[in-house]
Image (cartoon, rainbow, N blue to C red):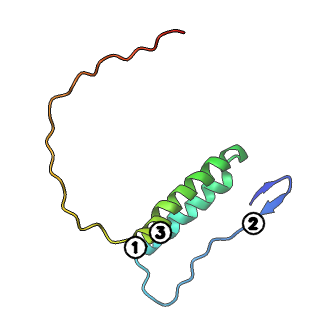
Amino acid sequence: MAGTPLGHMHHHLSMTFTGAEVTEKDLQEFWVRALCHIFVDTLPVNALHEVAESIVDNYNRHVIRPWWKAAALPAASSARLQGKLGPAKTRPSFHLRDE
C-alpha cells in the first residue's frame, strides 16, 4: 500500500484463469507486470514524476504511435533520388565585428 499525507491507495493484482491453457509467456507477462507495480509502489515520492513521464513515453511509443501509423496517409509514390557522398568542404570563418 502506497500513501501520501492526503490518503492511501491500495490496489490488487490478480490473474484469472479462464480455462484456457496458460502459456509460459502469459505467466512471464503477469510476473513482469506484478514486479512493475511493486517497484512503483515502493518508489519515493520525488521519483514518481520521472517514472510517470517514462510510462507516458512508453505508452506513446507502443500504443499511440502504432495506432497513428496505421491511420497515416499512404507513402508518396515519387521516385527516390540517388546521391553520392563527396569530399568535405571547408567553410570560411564567419566573424562578427564588435560594435
Residue that numbered label 3 is attached to: 29
- Amino acid on which the number 1 mark rests in the picture: Ala
For marks 3 and 2, give the CA distance. 22 Å
The C terminus lies in quadrant: top right
Looking at this rendering, what residue extends furthest in the front direction?
99
For marks 1 and 3, give the CA distance. 25 Å
Residue that numbered label 2 is attached to: 10
Are discs 3 and 2 less than 8 Å apart at CB? no
Looking at this rendering, what residue extends furthest in the bottom direction?
19
- Viewer-proximal residue, 4 or 30? 4
Is residue 29 shown left or right of residue 39? Answer: left
Mark 1 element type: helix
Q: Residue at x 15, y 38 (%)?
A: 85
Residue that numbered label 1 is attached to: 70
For marks 1 and 2, give the CA distance. 37 Å
Label whose residue precedes the other's in the sequence (3 or 2): 2
